[in-house]
């Protein structure tokens, strides 16, 4: 390590100038990964039409990205502990950027699906070590602020995806949805090479068979969620559920006794970590239920256009952007359990308010309710991130970081699958059922968050 690298490998965060450059690199990467999780959904009809494929087949454009992300998140997080988070983050940025270019140049559905697979792998590498990287970038006294900025980027990227896609498609063709990532990715790689800190490396090695079992276990889990969302029969779902259970059992058996298991079950023995992860799954599940179901209500019931629908969703994103940095700063002074509990309570009440919309709501009627939900969601995220990372020992920051991203994606995937079930129960009242579940998810997250006030941190 040269003197410049040594200066960046600060024990308690980076100097202010290097910190800003490193945070910008991380934010660009995480923003692109979060945006591309949501942006392709809106573009599917246009992509299917131009590539002359069926809507059912085009769903793989979304599914393969999510599969690749969730299946490889924890292996990349474990790899970051061994070879350094910096290397894994830069690898992810590079692969994601190259894959984005390949997506923009795709000439057929198979070529686009393969490019999206590699894009998902790159996103997983970035997201898997993202939170651990922030822990190295920011000094302990400012980590809440750093997590707040990260929460802002993730939530806004996910929330504005449909609006951004609609605006781009109104002015250009679908390849531009992916092409815009290329210059941003190049900037992020250059900034990252200059400013991302080197971190201490663990002495243990990554076990390749464990990584492979992890890929199959989580890949099958998300595949099962996707098939359930598309109303596949039990003749297909039952074998998938059995195979998922078998691979998880093999994974747990393989890593039993390992000092740093890839699926960090040892960290879940810490009550604060387990409750924080539960809070994350519930809250992102609530968000997934709302974000997937509300566009159907806005477009099919209220007759709004896709672009109008995107803007009706915007108040949620705007208030997340406002509240996330504030909550991050507060989490440096107040217990995350209390802040997260307040945020999830606000979110739950906002979702109940959406249920009570008048039959012919105005933009104001919708706007203030979406804004109230955004306030709650933005208030929850940064304190919860800090609680998860703070409840894991520094040597296990990679595993904790992987759980942060995995909890988010599992919550969103669960929410999307439950929306499909709600519309199966009643095409007319499907959105109402989904919002009831969303409010219940947020309420469970609220109880889990406040429960952290009465548990002790593990050593």
Image (tube, rainbow, N blue to C red):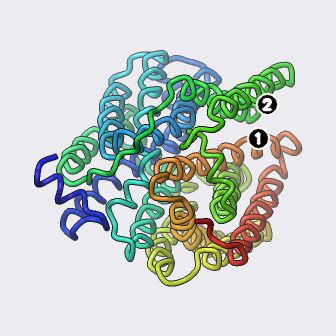
| Residue wearing tag 1 | 420
Q: Nearer the viewer, residue 85 or 176?
A: 85
> On the image, which quarter does residue 261 sit in?
top right
Q: In the image, which disc is placed on residue 1?
A: none
Is 133 above or below relative to 204? below
Badge 2 element = loop
Is 58 above or below relative to 180? above
Q: Inspect this view and state whether residue 364 appears.
A: no
Q: Nearer the viewer, residue 39 or 143?
A: 143
| Residue wearing tag 2 | 231
Q: Is residue 233 left or right of residue 414?
A: right
Q: Inspect this view and state whether residue 385 appears.
A: yes
Is the C-beta separation of discs 1 and 2 under 8 Å? yes
**Mark 1 and mark 2: Cα distance apart in space:** 7 Å
Q: Quadrant of the C terminus?
A: bottom right
- Alpha-carbon neighbours of circle 1 within 10 Å: few (<14), some, or many (≥20)? many
Q: Earlier in the sequence, mark 1 or mark 2?
A: 2
x, y percent for residue 86:
31, 46
> On the image, which quarter does residue 388 sit in?
bottom right
> On the image, which quarter does residue 91 sit in?
top left
Q: Is residue 419 left or right of residue 138?
A: right
Is 226 above or below relative to 39? above
x, y percent for residue 432:
81, 57
Residue positioned 54% across, 43% down in the render: 260
Residue positioned 44% across, 65% down in the render: 147
Residue positioned 59% across, 67% down in the render: 377
User: What residue occupies the far left of the structure in this picture?
Assistant: 3
Badge 1 element = helix
């Amino acid at each position: 390590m040269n003197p410049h690298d040594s200066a960046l490998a600060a024990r308690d965060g980076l100097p202010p100038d290097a910190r800003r450059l490193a945070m910008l690199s991380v934010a660009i990467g995480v923003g692109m990964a979060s945006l591309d999780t949501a942006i392709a959904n809106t573009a599917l009809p246009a992509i299917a039409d131009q590539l002359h494929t069926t809507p059912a087949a085009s769903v793989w454009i979304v599914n393969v990205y999510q599969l690749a992300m969730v299946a490889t998140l924890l292996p990349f997080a474990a790899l970051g502990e061994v070879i350094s988070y910096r290397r894994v983050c830069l690898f992810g940025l590079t692969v994601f950027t190259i894959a984005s270019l390949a997506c923009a140049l795709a000439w057929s559905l198979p070529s686009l699906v393969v490019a999206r697979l590699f894009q998902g792998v790159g996103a997983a590498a970035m997201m898997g070590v993202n939170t651990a990287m922030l822990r190295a970038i920011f000094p302990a006294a400012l980590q809440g602020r750093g997590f707040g900025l990260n929460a802002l980027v993730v939530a806004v990227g996910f929330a504005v995806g449909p609006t951004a896609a609609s605006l781009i498609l109104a002015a250009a063709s679908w390849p531009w949805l992916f092409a815009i990532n290329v210059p941003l990715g190049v900037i992020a790689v250059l900034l990252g090479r200059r400013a991302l800190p080197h971190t201490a490396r663990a002495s243990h090695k990554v076990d390749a068979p464990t990584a492979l079992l992890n890929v199959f276990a989580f890949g099958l889990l998300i595949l099962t969620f996707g098939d359930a969302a598309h109303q596949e029969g039990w003749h297909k779902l039952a074998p998938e559920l059995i195979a998922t259970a078998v691979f998880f059992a093999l994974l747990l058996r393989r890593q039993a006794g390992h000092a740093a298991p890839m699926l960090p079950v040892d960290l879940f023995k810490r009550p604060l970590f387990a409750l924080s992860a539960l809070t994350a799954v519930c809250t992102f599940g609530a968000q997934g239920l709302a974000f997937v179901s509300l566009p159907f209500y806005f477009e099919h019931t209220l007759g709004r256009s896709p672009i109008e629908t995107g803007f009706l969703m915007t108040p949620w994103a705007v208030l997340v952007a406002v509240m996330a940095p504030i909550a991050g700063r507060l989490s440096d002074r107040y217990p995350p359990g209390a802040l997260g509990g307040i945020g999830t309570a606000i979110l739950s009440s906002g979702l109940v308010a959406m249920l009570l919309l008048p039959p012919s709501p105005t933009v104001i009627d919708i706007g203030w309710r979406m804004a109230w939900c955004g306030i709650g969601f933005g208030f929850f995220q940064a304190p919860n991130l800090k609680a998860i990372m703070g409840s894991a020992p520094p040597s296990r920051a990679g595993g904790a970081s992987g759980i942060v991203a995995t909890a988010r994606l599992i919550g969103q995937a669960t929410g999307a699958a439950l929306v499909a079930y709600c519309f199966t129960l009643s095409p007319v009242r499907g959105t109402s059922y989904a919002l009831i579940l969303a409010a219940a998810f947020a309420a469970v997250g609220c109880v889990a968050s406040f429960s952290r006030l009465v548990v002790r941190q593990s050593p």
